[in-house]
Image: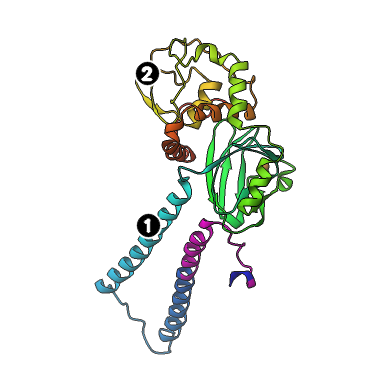
Amino acid sequence: MLNNFPLWPEQASTMASRVDALYIFLLIITGMMTLLIFVCLVYFAARFRYRPGVRAEQIEGSTPLEITWSVIPFVIFMVIFAWGAAVYFKERTPPADAAEVYVVAKQWMWKLEHAEGQREINELHVPVGRDIKLIMTSQDVIHSFFVPAFRMKQDVLPGRYTVEWFRATKPGVYHLFCAEYCGTQHSGMVGDIVVMEPAQYEAWINGGSTGPLSASGEKIFAELGCSTCHRSDSQGRGPNLQGIFGKPVQLEDGRTVTADENYVRECILDPGARRVKGFQPIMPTFQGLVSEEQVNALVAYIKSISPASAGEAGKTSASTAVPKAEPNGSQVQ
Ligand code: CUA
């Protein structure tokens, strides 16, 4: 129906109809209220108009009327709140088994890398009917990953990861926009999401791949000498990272954090910020020594050596999408 009456963008993800239903509900409520107010306005203007010789009389209070006009809007607002919250939590919580794509934004392009190792610029190929989780960061200023046909938009920040997810419902090419003003070429920071049939996608992903992202991460891990301290036999000077991802970590200051994408990232770029209990502050920072792509590869590698926690990883990283007032949330900007 909406295709012949294009007030809305195409619906091409599982979220699209949910978002539209809420939006249409809000439009109907607003339309009805506007109508009600105008009808009352016209009626009262006519009914209580000035007549020569008639004195205006004051009408005071009506408890039933006041209760009615308080309770009805309250119920309507609570419906909007509950419905909105349900849609929000659905959209904010990536399914645990979603395929992961790392996104690096910069002035003025989108760089994307699949877990399988495929790299793309301003283009993202995905199969239809599969949950895709985007783990996003920026190399410079704030950008925003916006795909109207999927009804999804999330700011992409320098110095931390934000997450969003979608499941495309029909093959096609959908427009990707940057939705946060980021400099002179902001309007040109666009791209395409190419949704393909699964078989077509398999052929695409297997052509020209450089190997899994976690394998490049493992290589970087060895090249930077990380493996000399972070030994898998727990005899190293740094914590053993096997199986750590998605698990709680005891910190030196007594707090406990979950080893999610943002924590691993922070440990690489600012190792002193939230140090693991029982280890000396000897790790150097890799700020400026590794690119955003290399940090992504390292995170993918740490994840890959924690196979059992895949389910929890999906849940914990959902919380990273919600801005939190952490004292060190902006240390690498
Ligand atoms: Cu990037 Cu606007």
Q: Which residue is pictured at 64% across the width and 68% down the height?
A: 6
> Secondary structure of the magenta portion, mostly?
helix
State the residue position of label 2. Answer: 253
Q: Is mark 2 within 8 Å of ligand 1?
A: no
Q: Which residue is pictured at 44% across the width and 72% down the height?
A: 33
- Label 1 to label 2, Cα distance in Å? 38 Å
State the residue position of label 1. Answer: 82
Is 98 displayed left or right of 183 in the figure?
left
Q: Disc 1 residue type?
A: Ala
Q: Which span is picked out in magenta? A: 4-28
Q: Disc 2 residue type?
A: Asp
Q: Which residue is pictured at 60% across the width and 27% down the height?
A: 215
Q: Quadrant of the N terminus?
A: bottom right
Asked if the magenta segment contains residue 12, the reply would be yes
Residue 100 or residue 305, whichever sits in front: 305
Q: Which residue is pictured at 45% across the width and 85% down the height?
A: 46
Horizontal and vertical percent position of residue 290: 63, 22
Horizontal and vertical percent position of residue 24: 50, 67
Q: Is residue 299 above or below residue 83?
A: above
Q: Quadrant of the C terminus?
A: top right
Where on the picture, by quarter, is residue 137?
top right
Q: Considering the numbered disc 2 on the image, is that residue within a helix, a strand or a loop?
A: loop
Q: Is residue 217 above or below residue 71?
A: above
First along the sequence among labels 1 and 2:
1
Q: Is mark 1 within 8 Å of ligand 1?
A: no
Badge 1: how crowded within 10 Å, few (<14), some, or many (20+)? few
Q: Considering the numbered disc 1 on the image, is that residue within a helix, a strand or a loop?
A: helix
Residue 120 or residue 183, whichever sits in front: 120
- Farthest residue, direction left: 63
